[in-house]
Image (cartoon, helix red, strand yellow):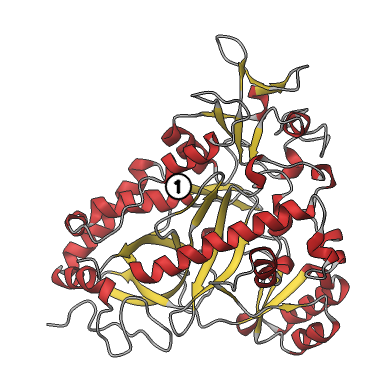
Amino acid sequence: METLTNQYNSSDFFDELIDEKGGFRAPAKQLLGYLDSLSEDELEKRRTTAEATIQEMGISFTVYTEEGNIDRAWPFDIVPRTIEASDWKIAEAGLKQRLKALNLFINDLYHDQNVIKDGIIPEHIIKESKNFRPECVGITPAYGVWAHICGTDLVRDENGDFFVLEDNLRVPSGVSYMLENRAITKRVLPELFENESILPINNYTSQLFDTLAALSPRDIENPEIVVLTPGIYNSAYFEHAFLAQQMGTELVEGSDLYVDTDDCVYMKTIDGPERVDVIYRRIDDLFIDPEAFDAESVLGVAGLMRAWRNGNVALANAPGAGVADDKVVYAYVPEIIRYFLNEEPILKNVETFLCDDPEQRAYVLDNLDKLVVKPANESGGYGMLVGPHSTKKEQALFAELITKHPRNYIAQPTLKLSTAPTLISKGTLEPRHLDLRPFILQAKDTYVTTGGLTRVAMKKGSLVVNSSQGGGSKDTWIVDTKGQ
């Protein structure tokens, strides 16, 4: 009888679970052997259990459309992705190295700017950055750390090597879905967790709490930490509420806080004002303080920047951290690592063409049908051109945009992204492209999640993994086969 994996064709890409000969890669052996032992009906039952669990747990995300905001159930595939623990250790070391260098880089930009003076990055790149905040010049946050929570997107190429696709240093989201993916999978495939080789991920929220607590300006046993959300209509509101609940902290909106005459932040409670020490803010820079930035903003807290500048409250991530969350700056990160750490980068960048450079721009304009073009400061998969899947009309539009605003665009080769088996319909596994967003925490100490959020391009042949663009997700297993 043909098994589920016998009919699987991994095509021309590096498949993370099944090798080119159809055999199971070591971290996937137990998983795929178990799935093959299930009948089509039993597998379908597990899939419907996952859907029911998602509904029961209320796991959703918001998609913004012209017709309005739509709440959708989290798109989930029950076949986990498996990665060998020894491979992950290398990636983990590379992520720690990268965030350490990026924080040194950000701190330097708001102080001496030696990285510019020494010719590592051109001055105009920073001057023209949408996320450089002059209001932050001269400020030194605790430990010199600006980006306390980073979500770095990794991909694997045709050889299975990890590459950094981009860094997300402003208000990175998705970690709650990583945790919920594991909770769903434990309900759907509980038998497989009896084996201790699947490394746990359930300590993230305690690590996040400890990272935030370490930032407190007051040396007290129980600092007051809050999660600042724009409100229920934000696409990541589920995550804001989830993290606040898991950490045992208050979830607040801007109207719940105020800055008093002592330049300290207070939270309104039924027992009276309570001083706030640390704010995990999930609001973009320009909306956090109408006194310092957008005067029309009703999401932030007037005087918040003043309180932060005076060292009376910690903000995570710090305003201004987004200067390194720029796809043009991304191209310079290997040199930034060498400059600040005197080390070779452990993780490679994807080859990147800067449209700001005349020679590189000419190459990009001549090869729009082959390249992926990205705007410097967009996220969520918006504003991209995926050359091989684009029309002549779309290519002409991007040629015009690049020519008009070259600093705003970069281009990269179309990667042969790795694939993994995905349950597409009853009894049918097909390869789908995927990426991985691990989360790195940095304050006094540095911590990296065990794996991260795997996002899957659910459409056949698509390279776009974002949930807002039709992508899905699956649990990520870091499997220690060598420790068995």
Q: Nearer the viewer, residue 209 or 295?
A: 209
Query: Residue 395's x, y, as percent?
Result: 74, 81
Q: Is residue 156 left or right of residue 421?
A: right
Q: Say which residue label 1 marks.
A: 176
Q: Is residue 179 left or right of residue 347?
A: left
Q: Amino acid at mark 1?
A: Ser
Q: For the N terminus, which image quadrant?
A: bottom left
- In the rendered image of this protein, does residue 414 appear above or below residue 301? below
Crowding at label 1, few (<14), some or many (≥20) Cα neighbours within 10 Å? many
Q: Quadrant of residue 472?
A: bottom left
Identified at 44% across, 51% down, the residue is: 177
Q: In terms of secondary structure, where does tag 1 sit?
A: helix
Farthest residue in the left direction? 1
Q: Quadrant of residue 314?
A: top right
Q: Nearer the viewer, residue 382 or 64?
A: 382
Identified at 85% across, 61% down, the residue is: 128
Does residue 471 show up? no
Identified at 80% across, 33% down, the residue is: 290
Does residue 339 show up? yes
Q: For the C terminus, which image quadrant?
A: bottom left
Query: Residue 76's x, y, as percent?
Result: 38, 58
Tally of numbered discs: 1
Query: Residue 430's x, y, as percent?
Result: 35, 77
Farthest residue in the top direction? 271
Q: Nearer the viewer, residue 472 or 407?
A: 407
Identified at 50% across, 52% down, the residue is: 174
Q: Is residue 457 left or right of residue 403?
A: left
